Image (tube, rainbow, N blue to C red):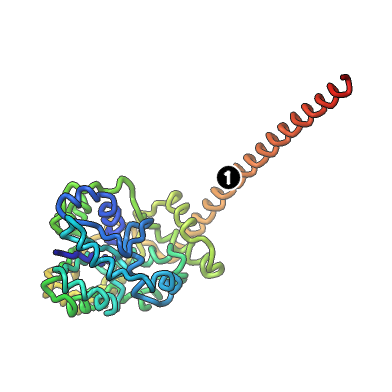
Amino acid sequence: MQVTIHIGTYKTATSAIQWALARNTKALARVGAKYADSGLNVALSKHLHLFDHVIDGGYNHDRHIAHKDENYLKGLKAELDEPGVSHLLISEEELSYPTPNIAKFLAPLADIADVEVVMVVRRQPEFLESLYLQFLKEPLRQLTDTFDDFLESHYAGYGDFAAVLEPWEETFGAESLTVIDFDELRKGDVVANFASQLGLPRGLRPPDHVINPSISPAAGELLRQIATTAPHFPRMALAGMLRQIDPGTDTTLLTSELNERILDQFRDSNSLLASKYGVKLDRHQESSKRQVTTAEIQAEALEAASEVIAVMWRRTKRAANAIQKMSDDQQTALDNIRGLLRSGDDVGKNS
């Protein structure tokens, strides 16, 4: 029996991998593998409910209350006992949340199966920028930090990969951990490469669209500024609109100086990662993206805001026209009914 726990991390094609694992049940079953039902958020294709069950804090408190009484551990053990199942798969990027509690909770699985913990890591400069823009989209986090503030906050702890892995190593042993460099994983088909790493069929059907598209720094700045004054506005809806207006794949917040500063911040962590798991993140890497200044970002955010207003105006106008047409159609129908009723009255009088 084997259990594979894929703990992310964020922004390393986790959404694409989870989508594929959730939708290739027959291909997985042919090799005795199953994507676990216990703790699975079906809509998101990931084991977010499992995380919510274990962790209570901050932005996910209400979700924790909803799942804290579930016995997901018992459910996972029961799934391993199902006929034909010899390999159970769990995937949730929140499992890389810097805490020992998650590994401790899942520790009993080692009593009945060989546990492998898989973590995909990414150079911290690109990782933290992508994480920042992702968290700006998520309404429950209510993030309003600038990128500089974000790098000084507790969120930077997600980038200390050696520290994130430590409780997993203490719980399951270093030999049970597999660490994958995201830059290597995305050479070609991410899903196929990940499946091959886990001994799963390479023919898993990948998604035909981007599951969790990134936003541009300008879009992120617009979200941040709006959230500062209106914390409960629909971030995800606006992020989707901004993504359509400006895919934003060619700009970055990372200057050369900031890139080096972030790498320096995680130098010791990356050294441990290299010595223990053979993954070297402490490397120079050229970027094809255009570095943007604060002034440029604010100008682009203003331009994006103008385009959003224009789009909303066009949609509002179309909706108003549709309502007016509906009103006109209803009025015509009412006039026809009145006419028929009057005709009936006239017939009655004449008879």
Residue 230 visible in image: yes
Where's the N terminus, which quadrant? bottom left
Using the rendered view, name the quadrant where residue 337 is placed. top right
Residue at the spot x=25%, y=49% of the render? 24
Image x and y of residue 322, in percent? 62, 40
Residue at the spot x=79%, y=29% of the render? 341
Using the rendered view, name the quadrant where residue 317 is placed. top right
Q: Which residue is mark 1?
A: 314
Image x and y of residue 130, in percent? 34, 63
Residue 59 visible in image: no
Residues packed near mark 1 inside 10 Å, few (<14), some (14 to 19) or many (20 plus):
few
- State the residue in front, 62 or 157: 62
Residue at the spot x=43%, y=70% of the render? 66
Image x and y of residue 223, in percent? 48, 63
The three-letter code of the residue at mark 1 reads: Arg
Task: Indicate whether 80 appears above or below 351.
Answer: below
